[in-house]
Amino acid sequence: MKKTIFAIAMMCSVTASLQCYAGFDEGKAAFMAKDFAKAYKEFEPLANKGDVKSQHLLGMMYDEGQGVPQNYSKAAEWYIKAAKLGHQDSQYNLGVMYAQGQGVMQDDVKSADWFLKAAQQGHVLSQFALGRLYTLGRGVKADGKLANDWFRKAAEQQHFKAQLALGKNYLDGNGIKKDLPSAEKWIRKSADQGHHKAQYELGLMYRDGLGLKKDMKLSYLWLELAARQEHQGAMLARDAIAKTMKAEDIAAAKLQASSWVPVIPGKKPII
């Protein structure tokens, strides 16, 4: 008799689970189709039953005002529910909200705590955020080594801002031993992805022969790429070195810049 009751209970559990997944899939499809009213209708009962993905998505909907009036407090409430269940994106979003005092009381310590929970699970944006916090000493004690540790974790996941931050720290010896080859490596990875600030730094390195051989044509190329993204410093540096270059070298660098495309991480750089 007990086995029969248990089997029935298991069947009910499986049925409820299938209904849950069906409701979530319908909600997700509606969300992707921007039918937010229908998405909310599907997600809300699931979220109330503890479905972490639905809780996170309801938080997003309140955060962005999608299908419901924008309400940061309600967004934070749903993010907290999902974050406590280990949802990385909700933990990151809470870190941002506590940092900005958005829907919650501003609290740098809580912000850092939520970023840490997500970062420890490999969440790249949280890893970069922690690198910034340890650099600034915001919500945590300033610590150059820990800042670079977190920047490295994010950089290894191809986060171009973290790559630049790590490269710059190697270049300047901030919280880490100065290492020009490592600086060039990480700054180039960021520049290859199209980050204009990294392209500017790489242009200066070629100009000054820092960590690599001086090369005015390559310096002009990288400065030109950054300048095309309206980097003011790159425009000034490019125009300054142009006065020392041959016209044909400038033309060649401009032509190369015109055909340049960002490198998808994992593929060989073009330059």
Image: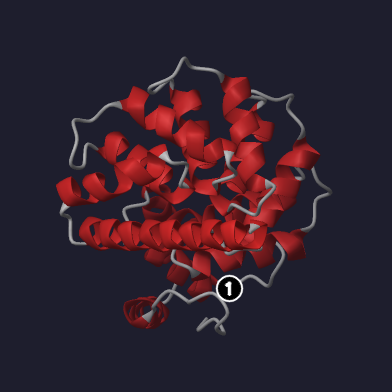
Q: In this view, does 164 lie to the left or right of 176?
A: left
Residue shown at 77%/32% (left/top)? 143
- The residue at the point 65 percent across, 54 percent down is 122
Q: Which residue is found at the position 77% from the left and 45% from the top?
A: 173
Against 243, is 133 above or below? Answer: above
Query: Farthest top residue?
Result: 105
User: Which residue ends up furthest to the right in the rendered image?
Assistant: 177
Q: Nearer the viewer, residue 113 or 24?
A: 24
Q: How many labels does the image show?
A: 1
Residue corresponding to mark 1? 215
* SS for dot 1: loop
Image height of 136 relative to 163, above or below: above
Q: Nearer the viewer, residue 218 or 91?
A: 91
Q: Where is residue 72 in the image (x, y as percent from the top left)?
A: 33, 26
Label 1 crowd (10 A; few <14 / some 14-19 / many >=20): some
Which quarter of the figure has residue 242? bottom left
271 is higher (above) or lower (below) than 201: below
Q: Where is residue 180 drawn, in percent x and y?
A: 75, 60
Amino acid on which disc 1 is placed? Asp
41 in relation to 210, above or below? above
Residue 57 vs residue 89: left or right? Answer: left
Please identify the quarter of the rendering in which residue 243 is found. Answer: bottom left
